[in-house]
Each structure stands twice: as structure tokens, then as C-alpha cells.
Image (spheres, helix red, strand yellow):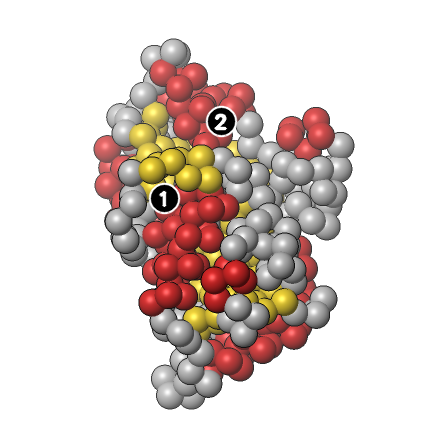
Amino acid sequence: MKTMMYRDAISSALAEEMRRDEKIFVMGEDVAITGGVYKATKGLLDEFGPQRVRNTPLSEWAIAGVACGAAMCGARPVAEIMHVDFIGCCFDIVLNQMSKMAYKTNGKLNVPMVLRTQGGRGKSNGCTQSQSLESLFTHIPGLKVVMPATPKDAKGLLKSAIRDNNPVIFIEHKGLYQTKGEVPEEEYLIPLGKADVKRTGKDVTIITYSKSVLTSLDAAKELEGKGIDAEVLDLRTLVPLDFEAIRESVTKTGRVVIVHESTERTGYGAEISAQIADKLFDELDAPIVRVCGANIPVPNATLPEIESAPTVEKIVKAAVRVCQGGKWNG
């Protein structure tokens, strides 16, 4: 194992896959010379040259459209949309082309592409560059959606996403790029659709993903001091969803807190909550509680921006509430 930054894990995964397969190329705004706005493609141009590391015009429509067409013609593009907030500029490609092509052609045309993008709060970038829009993608049949929380997961999941024959939306949180973690030195893959228990516990299950995993782990430490043993389940992949991992954890603890940074209203936590209520109702000892982003545009000022997202304090309060609330019938 070696210690690596999240952004370097992304770059390492791209380099390894590009060495393995000449059909893989990277494209996006400023991905070449500068290595991207978050330096996640730094060094690739020097090794692979401008034919395989391509700067594009400032046009998300062109980026997504060219990548979709190239994938249909046999290439395996990894296209970057600088911020997930800009996805509206190319949403027709996402909604009606890359996600539907295999279905429309009865499997004759696959779209083996990865659309990398960045989301989340934490940089005071304002309400149009700080959103968490993953639910838009999970609502679209034909797309896989990946949101890793650690350098190890980011590398292993990105490699699997690149090798997948289906279009994958790979969302990296801008607040994670400089976080560090241990990454295996040998080659490895992490399969899509496989959750990971980041902390075992017996009293309550905290279901989460992306940067909220780190916040939830901090909350679990604080809960330990209150006599509550929290399990933190990192979904890692939203589509496909590892519901069996959810089932195993919820059956053990009987209590659930769902944490994510996107807005509470129709956020992905609502889907998780509905599936648990449908399939695991008899396993629950307390109502499901969600700790999510506020239903407001993301504030620009630092303190309101922080307070509009899940915090350790909010998660702790929610966990205490479900652990002290007793059975459904009181």
C-alpha cells in the first residue's frame, strides 16, 4: 500500500488504463496542459500526447456528443465535464443518446464511455458550481452512476468504469481531491455495484456516499462517546445499487440514517428509504431518518455553505433520535 491523494488516484487509474488499451483517450476543457482544473489529469499529456489527451472547446455539448459518437465507433473515451452544474448544456446527449443507444439498437451499438464530472460544496464557488445532482442521472435508465469517497475506491472504480461497455457517470467531489488514503501498489479493480462497510457497528446504520462518508465517519466517532455503535455503509455506486449490503446491515442494526449532500427533496436518499420501507419494513425498529442538503441554492458564503450540507452535529442528532426513539409503536 502507498499513500496517495484522491486526484492522483484518478490520474493513476487513467494512466494505467490508457497503457493497457490504445482505444482509451481523455478529453475535456483544460485536461491536457494544465491537467484539469483539479489536476486530476496532470501528467497524462506528457506520456500519451495530444492525440489521446485532448483539450476541447468550451462546449459541454461538443464534449459529450463527440465522446458518445466516438464510443459508438469503437473508441473508449473518458470525457470530463468540468462541473456537474454544467450538465444542462449537454443533457440531451446524456438523456436521449448515450443512455438509450444500446436499447434503441437492440444491443448492436454499445456506448463504452465514462463521463467524469465534479460536484459538491466546499469551495465557496456559488450556487451554480457547487451542486450535487446525482439524482438526475440515477433517474435515467441506461446509465451507471459512481461516487467514490476514498483514493482507493476512486482508482479501483474508475478502472472498472472504463472497462464497462455501458455509459458511466463518474462523479468526484471537489472537496475530496486533496484528501489522502492508502492505495494498493499492485493493479486492482473494484466492481461496480458493490458497497463497502467503512465502519462496523450494531446500533444504527448510516448509509452514505461520496464526501458524506468522511463526515459520517467523524459522526460515528462522536456517537461512540455517547454509547452508540454506528455502522457506516458507503454505497460507492448508486446505479447499480448494492441492496444486499443494505439488507445485511439494516437487518443487523434495525435503525437507519441516510446521509447525502444533495437536496433532501427527491434526493437519492428518498429512493433508498423507499426501497428499505418496501423490502425491510419488518426489520426496522425506528423510522428512517434522512440528513441531507437543504432545499435551497447552495450559499456562496462559507458558513452558510457548510451549514446547508450534512454536518457531524446533524448526523449525531439524527442517530441519537433513531436510537432513542424506540419501536414503531412507541
Image disc number at residue 152 = 1
Vertical position of residue 29 compared to residue 107: above or below: above
Residue 6, disc = none
Residue 230 at least partly seen: yes
Q: In percent of the image, x 34 and y 38: which residue is there? A: 2
Q: Residues within 10 Å of mark 1 (few under 14, many from 20)?
A: many
Picture coordinates of residue 283 (x, y %)? Answer: 27, 37
Image spot of residue 72 (x, y percent): 46, 83
Q: Eyeballing the image, is 271 above or below 258? A: below
In the foreground, 286 or 6 = 6
Look at the numbered disc 1 and give the secondary structure of its residue: helix
Q: Residue at x 39, y 12 (%)?
A: 226
Q: Quadrant of the N terminus?
A: top left
Q: How many labels does the image show?
A: 2
**Between 171 and 238, which is closer to the camera in this rendering?**
171
Q: Where is residue 49 in the image (x, y as percent from the top left)?
A: 53, 68
Quarter of the image where the C terminus is located: top left
Percent of width and height locating residue 304: 71, 30
Looking at the image, residue 73 sits to the left or right of residue 254; the answer is right
- Give the side of residue 18 with respect to residue 137, left or right: left
Q: Residue 315 carries which label?
A: 2
